[in-house]
Amino acid sequence: MEKLRVLVAENHYKMRCFMVVLLARDFSVIGAVSDGEELVRSAIHLLPDVIVSDILMPRMGGQSARNELAAINEIVPFVFVTTLGKEVAQLLPNDSPVALVHKDDMFDHLNSAVAWVFAGSPFLSPHYRDYAPSPTTLRLREFLKKKHLNHGLNATVLRLLKWADTLETTASEIARIPTEADSVELIAEALLGSAGGIERQLLLKSVQEALYYCIDFASNLTGPQITVRLKRFLSQHGRVPLVERFLSLYFFNAVWFHTAESFRGEMITMDVLEHDQQQIENICHEAIVAVYQDIQMFDARTAQKLIDEIEQRLRTIINFEQ
């Protein structure tokens, strides 16, 4: 019996290789690409029986690639693989059977998913069964109905990056900050641009929390001690994790602030908060990695590109790009 012909799309090289090895046990893997645009071109040329694709990839995600193929009447069964939260299971397209497999479930369930969708049946790996939307997913849906972001976020990202790059030259300035417990707060104030009102409060809160993260949440340090810890963090990790943490905190804080009225009285546990904040942080991380791959230096345009990319990925999470 002739084996099913499978096309793979995954932007991370090692994960792509792992998927190919798994699928090759039962199927003929006819191609492996790294983004949605390549996936569309390869699918048109190779005519696979089934496509196995990550959801979030640079340039074009898996669902957008599926939509483009459908638009030209190339209807191919899809298996989506991802590390996204359980809420995506509720948002699978229903125009034809698809499968959803969490990457932690791939070893035992990826090949079964391929067989199921080819036979015309939907498939969910164990991670996505018995799903109920998380509080943050519901809040994200409410938040993204109306755009709340403005230029203040863009400007703060640029100032944060510039400050991280020039920490050596500004060390003496930071050292002159008084030794009161609010030294981090004073640094955060200095990093903000001209934003005002609620936007300034959200930016200030997010910058402060990001700085506390970099200094291991120590609250009783002097200005020079803060400088030493910040330099150590940047030396060990670089500026990307700092910006990533700031953006994830900002989006999380903005979502919860702007949806507070709609969800007043809702009981939320600390475990749920931590889980959902981690999910938003993961989205920011993927967006930053994708944008950094395409640019040589940060300016206002690329900072805005990063913010737009994160917002689009948030929309992908809650709407599955439908």
Image (cartoon, rainbow, N blue to C red):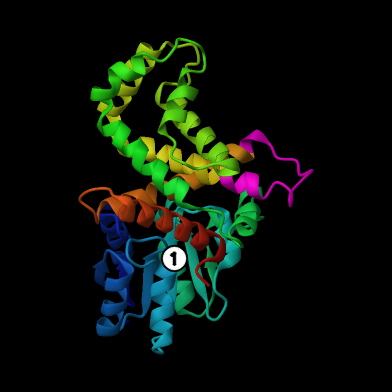
- Taking the image as shown, residue 227 lies to the left or right of residue 67, namely left
Q: Does residue 264 lie above or below 60 as drawn?
A: above
- Magenta stretch holds residue 258: yes
- Magenta stretch holds residue 299: no
Q: Does residue 234 lie above or below 69 as drawn?
A: above
- Judged by its main secondary structure, the magenta piece is loop
Foreground residue among 185 and 44: 185
**Residue type at mark 1?**
Phe
Image quadrant assignment for residue 291: bottom left
Foreground residue among 61 and 233: 233
Residue extending farthest left: 296
Is residue 78 in view from this perspective? yes
- Residue named by callout 1: 80
- Taking the image as shown, residue 264 lies to the left or right of residue 164, namely right
Q: Which residues are magenta?
A: 254-271
Disc 1 secondary structure class: strand
Which quarter shows the N terminus? Answer: bottom left
Image quadrant assignment for residue 269: top right
